[in-house]
Amino acid sequence: MNLPSYGEAKKREKVTYQTIDYQIPKQLKDKYHGKKYFLKTYGCQMNEHDSENIRAMLLQLGFVEISLMDDADLILLNTCSIRENAHNKVFGMLGRIKHLKEKRPSLLVGFCGCMAQEEGVVSDIMNKYKWINFVFGTHNLYDLPRILEESIEKGKQEIEVYSKDLDMVENVPVLRDKSYKAYVNIIYGCDKFCTYCIVPYTRGSERSRKREDILNEISKLYHDGYQEVTLLGQNVNAYGKDLYDDYGLGELLSDIAMMPIPRIRFVTSHPWDFTDKMIEVIGKYPNIMPSIHLPVQSGSNSILKKMGRRYSKESYLELFDKLKKVRPGIAISTDIIVGFPGESEQDFKDTLDLVHYCQYDNAFTFIYSPRENTPAAKLVDDISLEEKEKRLYQLNEVVNTYFLENNKKHVGRVEKVLVEGESLKKKGMYFGYTEENKLVNFTGKNIKEGSIISVKISSAKTWSLDGEAYE
Ligand code: 5AD
Ligand code: SF4
């Protein structure tokens, strides 16, 4: 048994990671032939991509995926810690699973992802959820086949959660959700320790994958006909710092852009280590998509300081302006937290002023949620829920106005759209995403999923565009 420890998770030491190749233990191959599994994924793209690895490992074990959990032999939850409501959803789900397990004790239940890295959650699992069969963390995802097997062999709860990454494991199999767009991890973990955020504890230190491993993966995707890659990391801008003196995200992006895969995206960028090289490369290569996610969190310098964000409103705006200048028409999206401890009316007004300046194309807005063991959780949470909700509502009203205004600018234009498929609601209606990552619903004939086509935009809504395929 290995339990998570925040003390260990917080340490940042210089380690040289060994790269090892994933291999499924031979005797486990196809051992569960025909058994059914149900996988539920919560949270960010990183978790979605981890689930693509989980699916591939379960396939190697012989499992088949089903979409209704009632008939499953194995239920696996890939969880998220980022805010309280993510927790609540998972605990709600556990309540439903418990009923199934009571009716069918042979049902296997596994628990993984960020919540598995939390001391409090794992202690609850050991005391109150003894029926969960196995738990594994974000650092040993690749160990799923062995942990699952061991929990069956031993017939008791198996908890294998490491608080530190042990090795860099390459070639973990992946069953991608789509055949035309792919996620590619470039860096794991986060060393920023923003005071409200649990991620540095659940995902560990910043560890970059070797550039040749990333470039090989993308080259294969390109040759397999993939149209789009999204480079993933909690903070992609830190790419390479732990491995190289003179090779960072700017250099990596330019190497990928020359391959040349048609569409390159990357998430998430911390404004603090956005280099001039990156800005130059974004301006230079048309296949780097004109869409950047640049979380600001707050427009008040005093709140940014308390959040430990390392930049001021002024330096954020300077970066924002540089991006708008180097790539005219670039869509910029953001994350904003309201109700951080001590946020005054004036601090909130500063955030609204910043939003009026930036006129974001998209924004994810949240009420501050204290997270176990983070520095901000020790601050007095002095704003009432009613006030937080009022601020969130007010902020949403403002951001939504700009989504619509920005979308309206696209009406009448012919846009390149990567087709995702036919609408489930309406036959003959398709949907896809523009280069700026805007959702477009459009009509057309002989439309092929996974192709990039021209669409003439006819009207704009707050969260989407409408259009018609254009010859
Ligand atoms: N409370 C509210 N929002 C949070 N985020 C991260 N931690 C918290 C928290 N404790 C938001 C930030 C981040 C996004 C992924 O989630 O805005 O950018
Ligand atoms: Fe969390 Fe800050 Fe790291 Fe983003 S940069 S994952 S908000 S600690």
Image: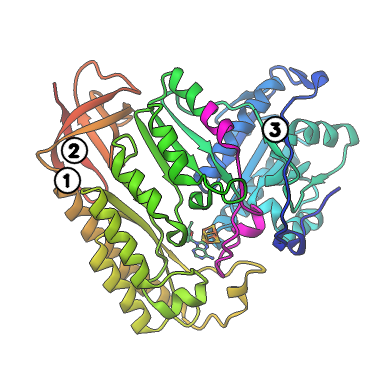
Kind of element beneath mark 2:
strand
Q: Which amino acid does label 2 sit on?
A: Asp
Q: Is residue 150 above or below residue 356?
A: above
Q: Residue 368 vs residue 103: left or right?
A: left
Residue 133 image offset from top left, x and y in percent: 78, 41
Mark in front: 2 vs 3: 2
Q: Which residue is drawn at 51% across and 72% down?
A: 307
Asked whether residue 211 is drawn in magenta, I would say yes
Q: Residue 74 carries which label?
A: 3
Q: Position of residue 47 (x, y in %)?
A: 56, 43
Residue 466's disc number: 2
For the question of whether residue 228 can be seen, the reply is yes
**Residue nearer the viewer, 5 or 96:** 5
The number of discs equals 3
Label 1 sits on residue = 460
Pointer 3 residue Cβ closer than 8 Å to ligand 1: no
Query: Dot 2 surroundings within 10 Å: few (below 14), some, or many (20 or more)?
Result: some
For the C terminus, the image quarter is top left
Q: Image check: 405 left or right of 400?
A: left
Residue 59 horizontal side relative to residue 195, left or right? right
* Relative side of 176 to 335, left or right: right
Residue 268 is covered by the magenta coloring: no
Front: mark 3 or 1: 1
Residue 306 vertical placement versus 190 (above, below): below
Q: Which amino acid does label 3 sit on?
A: Leu
Q: In which quarter of the image is residue 411?
A: top left
Residue 364 visible in the current orientation: no
The span picked out in magenta is 189-216
Residue 447 vertical placement versus 295 (above, below):
above
Query: Which of the two labelled residues, at mark 2 and mark 1, occupies the earlier sequence position?
Result: 1
Residues at badges 2 and 1 in contact (C-beta under 8 Å)?
yes
Q: Locate residue 142, reporting x and y percent.
A: 71, 35
